[in-house]
Image (tube, rainbow, N blue to C red):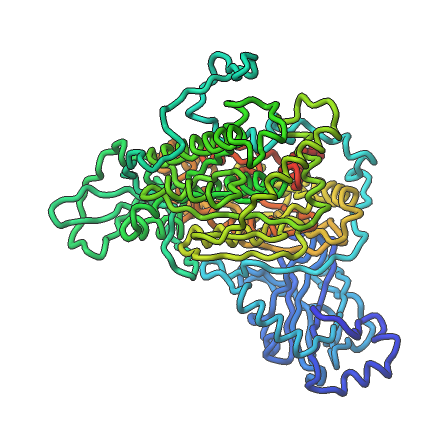
Amino acid sequence: MGTGASSSSHGGGDEPEEEEEYLDQGGGGQLYVSLKMENNYKLKKGELLPHVFGSVPLVGSWDSSKALSMERESTSMWELSFVVPPNHETLDFKFLLKSKYNSNALCVVEEGPNRQLIGGALQGDARQALFRISSDEVLEYRVFIKADRVSPFDLAASWRAYQENLRPSAVRGIPDVSIGSVPETGGENGSSSASLELDLEHYVVPAPPSSGPFYAANNTETPRSLSLTGVFTKSDGSVNSSYTYKDSGIPIDRSSKKEMEVVIPDLSKMYSSSGMVESKSVGTFSPFQKQDSQRGLFVDRGVGSPRLVKSSSSSAFSPEVRKESPETKNSMPEAAGAVAAAAVADQMLGPKEDVHLAIVLVGLPARGKTFTAAKLTRYLRWLGHDTKHFNVGKYRRLKHGTNQTADFFRADNPEGMEARNEVAALAFDDMVSWMQEGGQVGIFDATNSTKKRRNMLMKMAEGKCKIIFLETICNDERIIERNIRLKIQQSPDYAEEPDFEAGCKDFKDRLSYYEKVYDPVEEGSYIKMIDMVSGHGGQIQVNNISGYLPGRIVFFLVNTHLTPRPILLTRHGESMDNLRGRIGGDHALSDAGELYAKKLGNFVEKRLKSERAASIWTSTLERTILTAGPISGFPKIQWRALDEIYAGVCDGMTYDEIKKNMPEEYEARKKDKLRYRYPRGESYLDVIQRLEPVIIELERQRAPVVVISHQAVLRALYAYFADRPLKEIPHIEMPLHTIIEIQMGVTGVQEKRYKLMD
C-alpha cells in the first residue's frame, strides 16, 4: 500500500539519515504499519489465535477483551496492519493468544517486556514471541514489523476506492473485494510430496467433447425456412448441396406482408433508467389471474419460499395463479434480481414494439462481427435472457451452396444481390417468428453494410421488435489480415479450396466489393465499436440507447476484447467439511487439501512462470484462502462474490440431515435445483446474479487469472464460458483437485483440464 522508504525490525534501514529526514516531515505522509507473526503450529477454528493489545485505544488500551485479532495471511502467517502518523506517540504493545469467538476463554500474553514502536521502527531486537501455555508447554512465534511510507494522496485515493468499491456487506460485514499483498517466495513449495512432473501435460485429462475450437457461425440458429431433406440443385442443373429450400412464399419486398401481432410480453427489455439497481429479491415472475379490479404479481423467490408483491393499483391479491397457456409460456426470463424487477416495469409500461430486442450487426467482412455476436449471445443467455444468434451466411450457404466466388458479392451483380437480400429476409423472418413464440433477444449477424439493406430490416421490424444496430469498425490492417487468414482456415466457404493463398485473394476481392458500397450507420439506435478488438484502447459510440438491457449490453461490449489469455478455474483443496459431508461452513483444509494447495502452488509457478501480470482470485472463505497460500509471486484478490452458495439455515448440515429434519425443503431442492433457494439462503440464480461483476472483470482482464472458489460458483462460471444452458448449471461436474484452463482468444473459448491428484 504505497511505496517509498521503509523501515523494519531487521535493522531500522540502511540509511538512517534519510529515515530521520522522512520522519521529520510530520504531516507530509503516513505510516502503513504491518505486524506479522509466523508459526508452524496447526491452529484449528475455536483455538487460541494471535491478537495484539497495547497502550493506546487503537489496540485496546491494555484491555485484552478489546485486543485486535490478527488475520490469517497464509497457512503459517498472521497479520495486523494499521495507519499512524510518522510522529506518532510511542506505542507499547504485546502479542497475546486468545479465542476469537469466546471472550471468556483462556488468554495467554507473551513473555518478556513490552514491545515499543517509535516512528514505525520496533525498538530492541526481540524477534520471537514466547507464549507459556502451561508449565511444560511453550509456543514460539517469529515476529516481523514493517512500516511503509504512504503519501496523503495515496491514502486518500485508497480510502476513496474503499468507500466506493469495498464497502462491507450488510449481511456478513466483509468487503466485496479485498486485495492481498504479494507473498514472499519460498515456504513449503519445495516439499517432495507436493512436487510436480516437469511436463504439465502429464496431468492433462480429457475435457468435454464440445470444448475444442469451432467456427462460430456454424453454432448459430438452424434456419427454419430451409429444410435438411433432399438435395439442392443449382440453376445449371448441378448438384450443389444436400439441402432443399422451402419457399415460404414471402417476397423480398415486405411492405405488403401481413402484420404479426406480438402477444408474448418479453421481460428482457429493461426500464429506461441510467442507474443500475440490484434487487435482493431474486426469482422469476408469473402473472396473477385478473379478478374484477384486483391485480397483483406472484414473485417466485425460490421454490421453497414464495412471496406476494402487490402492484400499485391493487387493493388485494388473488390467491389463484393463472394456469400456464401458450401465451404465457416463456414470457419471463430465467433471470433474477434487477433483471426481473426491470422486466416487470417493461411488461407494464413498455410499448409493444419494444418488448423484443434485435441486435443487428453491421460491418465489413473480417471485422469480428460473428465473434462479437457469439460472445454477446453467450453473455445474455447466461444472465437468463432467451437469446438466439441468426447468421445470414449460414442461410446463404444452405440455399446457394458454399462455392460462391467473390463475384457473387458484387453490388452490380443483380442475381447475387437478390439472392443475398432474400436469405437476409428469410433469416430476419425466422427471428421475428421465434420472438412471437416467446424469444427475447435476437442477434442478427450479417454485413448489413448498406442503408438500403438496413431500411429493409427496419421496415420488417415495425411493430414487432426494437432494432439496435451494432457496427464493428477496425482500422488495424494487421488484425484484418489475421482475421482474413482465420476465415480461410475455418469458414465452410473455403473448405474445398485447396490453395490457401487463392482463397485469401478471393476473400480480399469480396471485401473490396463490400468496401465500395459501404454506408456507415447513421440511422436509428446504434452502438459503434471502433478499434475495440485489439484490447488496446478504441472507442464506443452510442446513439439513442436507453433501457436496462441495452445499457448492460453496452457495458459488456466496453469490457470485451480479443487478447488471448488463460483463465484457470479450480475448487479449493479438500476441506474438513468435505470429509464430513457437510455443506457450507468455513473450516480449514484436510491433509489432502493442504497437499493439493502445495501442488497447486507448484503448478501455477510452472504454468504462469512467464506471466508476471497474472493474479489469483479467491473467495473470502478460509478454505480458498488457505488453498492459495502456497502460490507465491502473484497478487491475491478476495471476492465476496466468489463465496460458496449460502445454504442459510441449512449451513453446516449434511443432506441426510436435511432430508430427515426438513423433508419439504429436501424435495423442493430435488425438484428444481436451479431456482431452489435455501431458507434464508441463496439459489443458483442468486449466485449467477452476484457473479456478473466477476464475469465482466474476467472479460476485461488482459493477463491470466487463477480463480480458486467453490463448487456451485465454479459451475456458474464454467457454464458462462462453455455456453451451457442455465438448467444444466446445478448438475455440471466440478471435481476436487482439478484445474480447468479456459483459453480465451480470437478463435473462441477452448478448454483443457489438469488433475493434480485423486
Residue 238: horizontal and vertical position, in percent? 56, 12
Nearest the viewer among 293 and 163 is: 293
Q: Residue at x 59, y 72 (%)?
A: 159
User: Which one is nearer the viewer's eye here, 524 or 177?
Assistant: 524
Q: Quarter of the image holding residue 311?
A: bottom left
Q: In the rendered view, does 352 fall on the left or right side of 23?
A: left
What is the x, y in percent for residue 533?
64, 48
Please name whichever residue, 321 or 13, is drawn nearer the observer in this view of the structure. Answer: 321
**Residue, x 54% and y 39% (percent of image)?**
374
Residue 57 x, y percent position in the rendering: 59, 79
Q: Note whether 745 is above or below 616 in the view shown.
A: above
Q: Is residue 712 visible?
A: no
Residue 507 occupies quadrant: top right
**On screen, 305 above or below 48?**
above
**Residue closer to the observer: 361 or 319:** 361
Q: Is residue 84 left or right of residue 467?
A: right
Single out the residue that lies furthest toward the right. 14
